[in-house]
Amino acid sequence: MFSPLQLDPQHMVEEMAAFQRKLAEGLPVLKHLDEAHYGATPHEAVYREDKLTLYHFQGDTKPSAKTPILICYALVNTPWMVDLQPDRSLVANLLAQGEDVYLIDWGYPDGADRWLTMDDYINGYLDRCVDVVRKRHGLDAINLLGICQGGTFSLCYTALHGEKVRNLLTMVTPVDFKTPDNMLSSWVQHMDVDLFVDSWRNIPADLINACYLMLKPVRLNQQKYVALVDILNNPTQMENFLRMEKWIFDSPDQAGETFRQFVKDFYQGNKLIMGEVELGGRQVNLRDIHCPVLNIFAKQDHLVPPAASRAMQKYIGTDDYQQLAFRGGHIGIYVSGRAQREVPTAIHAWLAERDH
Amino acid sequence: MYEKADFLTDWQSLAQQSWDAWLDFARRSGAPVNESLDNSAAVERMLEGMRGYFGWLQRAGVTPPPSQGPDWQGQFRQFIEQAGEPFRKMFGKLEVPGSEMFEQQMKRWFGALQEPMSELHDWLKLPTFGYSREHQQLQQRMLGAMADYGEQLQRYHAMMADANLKGLELLEQRLAEHTDPERQIQSLRALYDMWVDAAEDAYAKIAMTDEFRQIYGDLVNAQSRMRELQQRQMAAMGAQWGLPTREEVDSIGKRLQEVRRELRAARDEVTALRDALAEVREQGAGGASATAQKSAAKKAAGTRRSASARKSAASKAPGKKAATKKAATKKAARKSAPAKTSSARRSAKR
């Protein structure tokens, strides 16, 4: 019987020497890289309120679509994942397809925003952004694209303000928060959320990020940086890595009261699928959503398991429901090469069929 | 023939050079090479990530890996015993964020105590008396919360150590599938990657258990409780010194947000009423029917009724957020406002 390890000392030294060589070649590259930026597509601010900014993107050509798309991102992380860099941009690809795109940047909440509730975000900020876009285009209803938690917000919004949403698109959006494979959900079930929010007030971004890193602790805290040595001498790949790294950790804190309700009502209570979420004195019932819905989720999503998104079809009221399962992860669905080819075209084709 | 002494010298030297290169770079990235703080922060994170790997490499180099023969598992365990330390440390370090600071505090505080923990618990149960009884009680509660947090942290560490152990067992099982000469692992990096896969798979399994959920929740709750009591202590001290406290700032912020909601609701209602009035006037000027006038007036009235209904609904809602109650008024009025705007626009076109 042989040992599974055939580690020859000389080979080990050579391996270490090669590692050292890569470091020596790569470190000068790293030293001279510029600061990473995102938000590559030209855009202008068309509305501001508190920390929120509503952006309108400009493509190379005039949009051919009749109805604009408003992207509602999650409160966690900045929304620039949809426009990370020129060759990895959902926004740029939608513009190239002829769509007209708006994006809500929620900004970075501070202590003054601690008391913002989900009602303030959904019936307040989001509703006013929808109104701004409607007014700019002289339309009664627009297309709404919600991403992750922003997708959940969009579902709530559409259930309450259906007359303003012509088509609803959701990406990697949790609907059933208690599927058996949802690790995040499992972790918060025994948490005293009131005590947690009362002691932290706004929830620091570092805390949220550390929690996400703990979903795959060794891979995300160590292995990815070991693998970095392999691309250290490649400026383009390093720029991409640093840009993503910046996006991951450049995160807003979470407004305390919104965090409280989101964890209690959605993660712990799973009230969205039961029609028991209440916003501004009104019940949110997914059965009240009657516009066409396209639900896109990622098959390898470790943050929002596919089952959590797929559940939407069971609870939604519309007769025009479609879902698209993308082969990739929670982030890959925006930045991978396949995502650039498949997702914007699928969205455009689906909308074109309904944008008469 | 490559002598062992030469190997060890070369190995240690290379590992040290690699690590020194990282450290040197980290230091320089803080210097004004490109004035980029972001890159510097990224390097710090990379450095932290690499630390465990270099530690493992160094130990792996000086620990004889399992050789051929039937007892490779025994040798492997010995190898793991030596080379696996950085991984154990890694898991041990992965805690609830912010806990590191608390842990250091705990060590200082409890290190200073002469009595064993059981006596501390007894003391914490003693009733308090007299002029300063409230202060004493708060201090007892805080000490109790700190002791509880220490216990929860120990449970969490034990669970993480178990996750690491399970990962190593899984690695051993997977390695057993590589005893065929053509499938042997020939590089440390391949072994490392395999180790990471096994560690993640074992951890993922444990992280989904009820036990993990319970221990994780207990730890977070214990930390929150301790934070809350510490803040109360700070607030009491601040008040004695005449300083504004967090509670005061929170109260002001909460009231301000309520006023903002009411203001917006009132503004939306005024807009809706103006729109409705304009519609009535327009239709009246054009000789519109009485029915149209009634319809517009009804819309305006609806706005007020609906706002009032929501206020009532919100007032019935349980919970500590009084803000919700105030928000209801705003929501009702706001909802109707854009509809009126559209309606007015359509009227204008006509």
Image (tube, coloured by chain):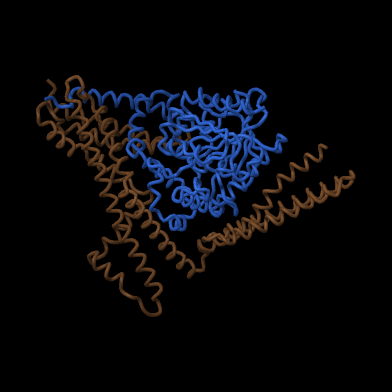
Chain colours: A blue, B brown
Would residue B62 appear left or right of A139 to someone viewing this image? Answer: left
Q: Quadrant of residue A58?
A: top right
From the image, which quarter does the N terminus of chain B lie in? top left
User: Looking at the picture, how far across and down is residue B150, in whole percent?
Assistant: 30, 57
Identify whether B237 is placed above or below A269.
below
Q: Residue at x 45, y 48 (%)?
A: A267
User: Looking at the picture, how far across and down is residue B113, in whole percent?
Assistant: 26, 65
User: Looking at the picture, how far across and down is residue A293, in whole percent?
Assistant: 56, 34
Of B284 and A225, nearer the camera is B284
Q: Quadrant of residue B181?
A: top left
Q: Quadrant of residue B44?
A: top left
**Does residue B40 appear in the picture of this structure?**
no
Q: Residue at x 27, y 53 (%)?
A: B154
Which residue extends farthest bottom? B130
Identify whether B260 is placed above or below B347.
below
Of B132 and A189, nearer the camera is A189
From the image, which quarter does the C terminus of chain B lie in? top right
User: Looking at the picture, how far across and down is residue A119, in whole percent?
Assistant: 58, 50
Identify whether A53 is placed above or below B271.
above
Of B167 and A285, nearer the camera is A285
Q: Residue at x 34, y 49 (%)?
A: B213
Q: Residue at x 83, y 49 (%)?
A: B293
Identify whether A26 is placed above or below A188.
above
**Does residue A55 appear in the picture of this structure?**
yes
Would residue A332 appear left or right of B79 to someone viewing this image? Answer: right
